[in-house]
Image (cartoon, rainbow, N blue to C red):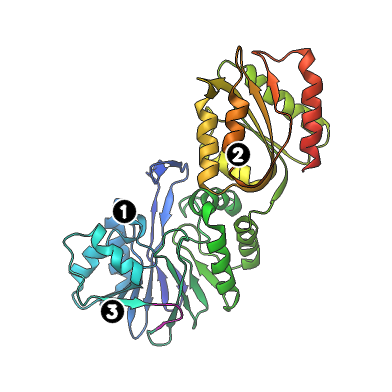
Amino acid sequence: MNVAPEIRYIGVDDTDIDLFESQYVVPNGMSYNSYLIVDDKVAIMDTADRRKSAEWWHNLETALAGRTPDYLVVHHMEPDHAANLAAVLEKYPALKVVASAKAIQMMPQFFENADFIGRTISVAEGDKLELGKCTLQFFMAPMVHWPEVMVSYESHNRVLFSADGLGKFGALAHEEDWACEARRYYFNICGKYGTQVQMLLKKAAALDIACICPLHGPILNENLSYYINLYDIWSKYEVETPGVFIAYASIHGGTAAVAQLMADMLKAKGAPKVSLCDLTRDDMAEAVEDAFRMSTLLLAASSYDAGVFPPMHDFLHHLQIKGYQKRTVGMIENGSWAPSAGRTMKAMLEPMKEITLIEPIVTIKSRMKQADRPALEALADKLLQSC
C-alpha cells in the first residue's frame, strides 16, 4: 500500500493479541504501523512489535526491492514500535538511526549488546533530514506519551508521522468506527498528558497536512479536521457528550439495583444520554473512556473492609492516574452496618482537578427501599443540572 509515490506502508496487523500492553482488551487486534520512504535516500519509519517481526521483515524487504536503507527514524522507543531496531542495525551496517536525544539515551536499555557508537543522529526541534524530493522535519512531542517521543513532517507529500498520536486500537483489517476505539485508546494511553498533546496540536496547526500516519490505526487522509477536533476536545478535558455515566460496583446485587433505577430515572427525566457500567465485569478501559467522554459521573458502590468494594477503588485509581478532571460527580454508597464507601470515594476524588462533588452522598442500607426514593430523586435532579 502506497501512502504517496515515495511513501509505502510496511506495517503489520496483529489479530492474535488479546491484551495490548498486557492490560487493554483488543477484540479486533492491533496494528503496528511502519513506513518506508524510497527517494534518493531511503528511510525506514519505525519498525514493529517482536510478535510480528517476521511479517515486518518480509514487508520491508519487499518494499525495498533491492535498495539499501540509509536511515531508521525512531519516533518512539516503546517495544511495540522499536523491537527490531538492533536487528536493523546488524543487517545494514551503514545505516544511521535518527531519533531524539532522549530516545538515543534509552536505546541501550532495550538492546544491551547493540553497538550504537557512531550509528545515531540526534535531532532536535525543527531539524531537517533531506532524502531527495522528500524532506523530513522533526518536532519534539515529549510525554505524548513517553519523554523521548517526536513526530516528523514530510513536506513534499504533506504527511505527518504522528507517533502514537491520533492512533487507535484495532487491526487495519477490521473496519470500524474510528472515534470509539480512538477515544478508548487516547484516554487510556495518553489521557494524563493533555497539556503535552495540546502543545503538539499547536505545532501541527502550523503545518500544511494532507495525511496523518500514526503508529497504530488507519492512515488518515480525509476529514482531518474531524479527528483533530476530537483530539482537541479530549486533550482539553472538555465534555464531548452531555449525559450521565453511571459506574457501579455491587457485591450481592443491591447496589446494582440502585444503579439501574437511577439510569431509568435519569432517562425518564430527560437526560441527554445515560450509560451504565458494571465495574465488576465490564472493560475497565471503556469505563475510563466513558468517564472522560461524558459530562457527569455517578458512582454507586458497596462498602468493603471499612473502605470501598475493590472494583470501584480500581476504577477511581485509574481516573486518578489518567488525570480525570473538570467533571461533576454524584455518589451512592451501600452498607449493611457501617457504610464506608462514600467517604472512601470522596477521599479519592478530592485531589482531582476541578471536580464538583454533589452533596449529600446518598446512603442505602443493604437493599433499596421506598423511603430511599426521595433522596435518589433529588440526586437525579442535581445530576441533570450538570449535563
Reading the chain from its start, which is encountered first: label 2 or label 3?
3
Type of residue at label 2? Leu
Element type at marker 3?
loop
At 52% across and 32% down in the image, what residue appears?
A: 313
Lateral position of residue 337 relative to residue 121, left or right: right
Q: Position of residue 182 (x, y in %)?
A: 55, 53
Magenta segment range?
124-128
Label 3: few (<14), some or many (≥20) within 10 Å? Answer: some
Residue placed most toward the observer, 198 or 268: 198
Question: How far apart in space, not on screen, are marks 1 and 2 (Cα)?
Answer: 41 Å
Lateral position of residue 126 relative to residue 367, left or right: left
Lateral position of residue 68 relative to residue 346, left or right: left
Reading the chain from its start, which is encountered first: label 3 or label 1?
1
**Disc 3 marks which residue?**
70
Nearest to the eye among marks 1 and 2: give it.
2
Mark number, residue 349 = 2
Q: Can you say which quadrant of the picture contains the N terminus? A: bottom left
Q: Is any part of residue 283 visible from this angle?
A: no
**Disc 1 marks which residue?**
52
Lateral position of residue 39 relative to residue 341, left or right: left
Q: Relative to 195, does residue 332 appear above or below in the rendering?
A: above
Type of residue at label 3? Asp
Type of residue at label 1? Lys
Q: Position of residue 144 (x, y in %)?
A: 48, 61
Label 1: few (<14), some or many (≥20) within 10 Å? Answer: some
